């Protein structure tokens, strides 16, 4: 599988390049940057043969099978459509787009062109979340009554760029983190939030965008979900909890890119620490993407998952801005 990177980004250099190269018979042939020097420096630093500043030229390389899009959020839509039109398989970063209609267009275009289109929601690939998913789907906690996600982190200084001050690039904690929590809740409960209420805040970092938000979602099963995302919480730690009729799951430090954390199950038998695998999340995501391209599997989060997690995040933002309950509009996907 020959890959082209669209975006000279930090997520590519810190995680995705290694994860692509960890797959059998996979290679990265080029990178696209809007800046010639940055592109060249990125290519050299990461041992990538070519850099481009023109997307059409990069996509014109017939040897490229797949692209990984990790530019800022406002660029994902047009770049994905161009890659799909060129017949490339696409792994796109979250949030897929700035609007649900754009994300739906990307998914439909890929289906029409017959290429794989996936969303890089990494948390579904974590050993911790796979173990939690097994507990829930095997009925260990009975019927799920409620869930809580706390994902209020301290955004590291090196990430305090467009995320905290550029709404037009898709900044704000809601497109950055709530979108992941939406995907994770959908993954565990296997249902899509119906309606949300929310309050957002600027708590020391956001400049023209929210840096903190709390929301409550209603699920079709009757379960309720409470979420908290922030860029400004230095010591809060992350976690997720599911409370059911027969037990509760308490997971700590699992809303992270690293294969770490702890899961406790509390039920009538007492308290049990649940073991889980500690594989690299992104390597697993890439492996499943490769399987999908080869026709032997499906991506861990496909395009529809990307649309739906975006739809929930945008509903949370609308609810916070209007002060009203908002029904999630999934764009008929
Ligand atoms: P970066 O800020 O590192 O990169 C985004 C863009 O910013 C790049 O495409 C690049 O443009 C430009 N850029 C990079 N470095 C510089 C610089 N020094 N000066 C000026 N511009 C620069 O973004 P992230 O890697 O943090 O995020 C990229 C995407 O990935 C986002 O959509 C984000 O939501 C997603 N993401 C997903 C994660 C996940 O786990 N799924 C984790 C982190 C991010 P150009 O390409 O034109 O050179």
Image (spheres, rainbow, N blue to C red):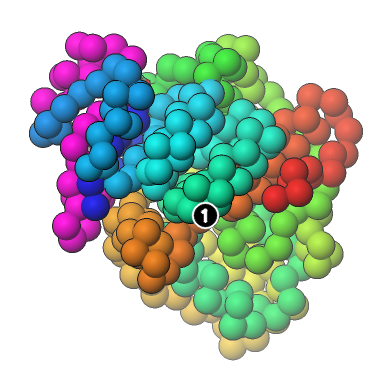
The answer to whether residue 208 of the structure is visible from this angle is yes
The answer to whether residue 306 of the structure is visible from this angle is no
Q: Residue furthest bottom?
A: 269
45 with respect to 71 (left or right): left
Say what secondary structure mark 1 lies in: loop
178 is higher (above) or lower (below) than 31: below
Q: Residue at x 54, y 14 (%)?
A: 166
Q: In this figure, which residue is indicated by the disc labeled 1? A: 302
277 is higher (above) or lower (below) than 103: below
249 is higher (above) or lower (below) than 202: below
Q: Tell me where residue 82 appears, x and y as whole percent.
A: 45, 31
Which residues, given as a range, are shown in magenta?
Answer: 17-44
Q: How many marks?
A: 1
Q: Is 189 or 58 nearer to us in this picture?
A: 58
- Give the quarter of the image for residue 109: top right
Q: Tell me where residue 193 appears, x and y as whole percent.
A: 75, 53
Q: Residue at x 38, y 71 (%)?
A: 296
Q: Residue at x 60, y 65 (%)?
A: 188
In the image, is residue 24 part of the stretch drawn in magenta? yes
- Give the quarter of the image for residue 96: top right
Q: Quadrant holding ligand 1?
A: top left
Q: Is 134 or 275 nearer to us in this picture?
A: 134
């Amino acid at each position: 599988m020959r890959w082209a990177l669209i975006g000279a980004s930090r997520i590519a250099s810190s995680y995705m390049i290694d994860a692509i190269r960890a797959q059998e018979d996979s290679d990265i042939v080029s990178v696209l940057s809007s800046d010639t020097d940055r592109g060249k420096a990125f290519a050299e630093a990461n041992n990538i043969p070519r850099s481009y500043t023109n997307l059409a030229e990069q996509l014109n390389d017939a040897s490229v099978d797949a692209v990984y899009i990790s530019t800022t959020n406002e660029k994902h839509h047009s770049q994905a459509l161009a890659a799909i039109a060129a017949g490339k398989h696409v792994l796109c970063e979250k949030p897929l787009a700035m609007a649900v209609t754009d994300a739906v267009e990307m998914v439909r275009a890929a289906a029409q062109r017959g290429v794989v289109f996936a969303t890089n929601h990494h948390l579904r690939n974590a050993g911790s979340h796979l173990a939690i998913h097994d507990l829930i789907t095997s009925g260990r906690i009975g019927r799920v009554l409620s869930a809580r996600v706390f994902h209020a982190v301290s955004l590291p200084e090196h990430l305090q760029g467009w995320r905290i001050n550029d709404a037009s690039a898709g900044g704000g904690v809601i497109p950055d983190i709530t979108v992941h929590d939406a995907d994770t809740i959908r993954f565990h409960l296997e249902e899509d939030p119906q309606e949300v209420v929310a309050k957002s805040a600027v708590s020391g970092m956001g400049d023209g965008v929210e840096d903190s938000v709390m929301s409550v979602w209603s699920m079709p099963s009757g379960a309720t979900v409470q979420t908290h995302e922030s860029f400004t919480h230095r010591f809060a730690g992350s976690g997720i909890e599911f409370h059911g009729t027969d037990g509760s799951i308490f997971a700590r430090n699992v809303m992270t890119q690293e294969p770490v954390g702890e899961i406790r199950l509390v039920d009538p038998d007492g308290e049990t620490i649940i073991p889980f695998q500690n594989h690299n999340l992104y390597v697993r995501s890439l492996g499943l993407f490769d399987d999908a391209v080869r026709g032997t599997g499906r991506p861990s989060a496909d395009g529809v998952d990307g649309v739906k997690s975006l739809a929930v995040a945008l509903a949370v933002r609308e609810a916070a801005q209007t002060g009203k309950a908002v029904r999630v509009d999934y764009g008929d996907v």
